[in-house]
Image (cartoon, coloured by chain):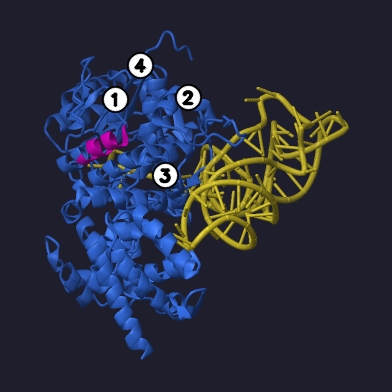
Chain colours: A blue, B yellow
Amino acid sequence: MSSTSTHVVTRFAPSPTGHLHIGGVRTALFNWAFARKHAGSFLLRIEDTDQARSSESSTRGILEDLAWCGIDWDEGPEFIDEIGRPIGGDPRSVGSFFQSKRLDLYNRVIDEMIERDLAYPAFDTPDQLAALRKEADAGKQSFRYKRSPSYDRTKALERMRAGEPCVVRFHNPDKVVRVVDEVLGDIHFQPEHTDDFVLRKADGFPTYHFAVVVDDQHMGVTHILRGQEHLNNTPRHVALQIALGYRTPVFAHLPLIFNADGSKMSKRDKDKAAREACNKALISAEMIAEMLTIVEPPIVADEVRQWQSDKRRGLSADALRVLSARINITLPEIDVEDFRRAGYLPDVICNYMALLGWNPGQKNPDGTDLEKFDPAFLAANFSLDRIGKTNSRFDRAKLASFNQSAIAAMPDAEFAERFRDWCDVYDPSILSRFDAARLDLLCTAAKPRVKTLSEVASPVGPVGFAFIPDHAVAFDHAAVDKALKKPVDSTTHGVTTGAALLRDFASELAALDPFTAEAIESSLKAFTESHGVKVGSIAQAIRVAVTGSTVSPGIGQTLAILGLDSCKSRIDRCLREVSVAVA
RNA sequence: GUCCCGAUCGUCUAGCCUGGUCUAGGACACGGCCCUUUCAAGGCCGGAACACGGGUUCGAAUCCCGUUCGGGACACCA
């Protein structure tokens, strides 16, 4: 492949029938990286030839998702990203980038093909086709449509011109088709497996196979990187290209990505997880419907029952979100939007996805494999020959680990900014509940402990204590026993308890000014020295009093985040409850 | 069922093309220890894989064939 003579053009061509799937991110990313690497163009084309399933809102969502990932397209629908940068456009005048707006082109090509008998109208009804399929099935053969030898072309053309509804099929020559794939090598498909597939549907829209070939030609696409599920479509595309005298682009079929259990990653996984959790917890349809009354449109118990019993049924994204929050489960992330909401960083997502099927094959200075890199590195190092052949499983734990280390490596201020951006979109109330200084403290404490941004705001996350009202702190029994009631040796007070130490320390705390993490820590040091106790014995007592558990960030940070009033209130309440329990 | 593709630790993978340096390396996860006011992070250590069978060769994870297993495609969806 000579990189000097050809201007590389790659493309990502989603159909706008939903959100951008995480698997789509990798396909888009590889096409993007390949174009960048060769100083070519990456274009985005919207394949909206399925009139029933395509939607404009879905198109917008996909553009947003791609842009958020940092995958910018040189050509395609115009879009302004979050920092006001324009993406897309049509510098070579090859648009439109919506297939639904290219019908004239497809029809011109179809007419020419019919003229040359490269294509022909067919009038079979769906029922007839179903019967043929059934017949083939019974004969243990795979069904393939071929024009019958008795086909009367003249008559068929007359019927078509008379306006009789029909599809147009490709008159596929019986020839061996060779597919050259940069990942898989040469693959040969025998003539007996070719078929006369449909080029134009009865509704006048092109099929995927036809539109893709025409568009790739007319848009000058040189390299097609796509999922392996398209491998069996490729001989069709190549046969069409040959018949039409088109260039054959370079193909690279990417290995597939599955769930950890080997199942297909699908939107239905969210329904499955929610359904199983409801069943396990014996939550009735009525209770679920009750939880979902706030969803628009409201969902009634009958619908819930159907959803519970029928695996093929799905609840709306909103409904699933509300339900999962109410029953306190985490839904599996499937779409880019899910990962964004969960608080994964776009660069980390790109990094991790790139590793599923591609590997830079380089070492770090310490001898370990180079695995962590940014999009710029990918753009500079991406190559087809390092794409693997084996399917992979999506490992959320590894993604989370990458995200955690990326977060930990960030300066505090940057992390706080990222978290504020996240709040803006997903939970703006946090921004009004915490003043700027407290939010910064919270972020500093959370940063080394969270894997995602959403974890910062989670009541069960490492700084969850800050999101619980003072009166609602639940004191863990075992923690209370261990940190407050168990005897503690003090050189000045003899045998005492955490609770007693806590009472003493609380008054010192009240006198602290300023109430900062550093001041609290040094006051704590002084207290332990004067009382001759270990730091742990008092620190754990405080921790249990203000968080209800023995786990929290550093005690200075923990108290500073809460502020003096909240600390006092929590400590008082704890002491009260403990003494009641003791008495 | 037919066609197509694939096969290295639990998972992602390096190594394979250009056989020996591989008693197979790394990462995530897991277990242990250390550090420590808890948690997280960090440090150290550990268990863990060439699917199987034939060939070629002095020598095979690497090349060839077969078996098995896994996956994909078989629409007027894309």
Residue A506 location, quadrant:
bottom left
Q: Amino acid at mark 2?
A: Asn
Q: Position of residue A553 (x, y in %)?
A: 39, 58
Secondary-structure class at tag 2? helix
In the displayed structure, A329 sits above or below B14; it is below
Say whether marks 1 and 3 touch (CB < 8 Å): no
Which residue in the structure is indicated by mark 3? A408
Which residue in the structure is indicated by mark 2? A381
Q: Amino acid at mark 3?
A: Ala
- In the image, the segment drawn in magenta is A61-70
In the displayed structure, A384 sits above or below A460; it is above
Q: Earlier in the sequence, mark 2 or mark 4?
A: 4
Left or right position of A528 against A570: right
> Mark 2, mark 1: which one is toward the viewer?
2
Q: Residue at x 18, y 67 (%)?
A: A292
User: Spatial distance from mark 2 to mark 4, Cα to Cα?
Assistant: 34 Å
Q: What is the chain letter for disc 2?
A: A
User: Spatial distance from mark 3 to mark 4, Cα to Cα?
Assistant: 55 Å
Question: Looking at this view, is A200 or A211 the one in front?
Answer: A211
Q: What is the chain letter for disc 1?
A: A
Q: What is the chain letter for disc 4?
A: A
Q: Position of residue A185 (x, y in %)?
A: 54, 28
Q: Please rate how many residues cluster around mark 3, counting C-alpha atoms within 10 Å: few if below 14, some from 14 to 19, many from 20.
A: some
> Mark 2, mark 4: which one is toward the viewer?
2
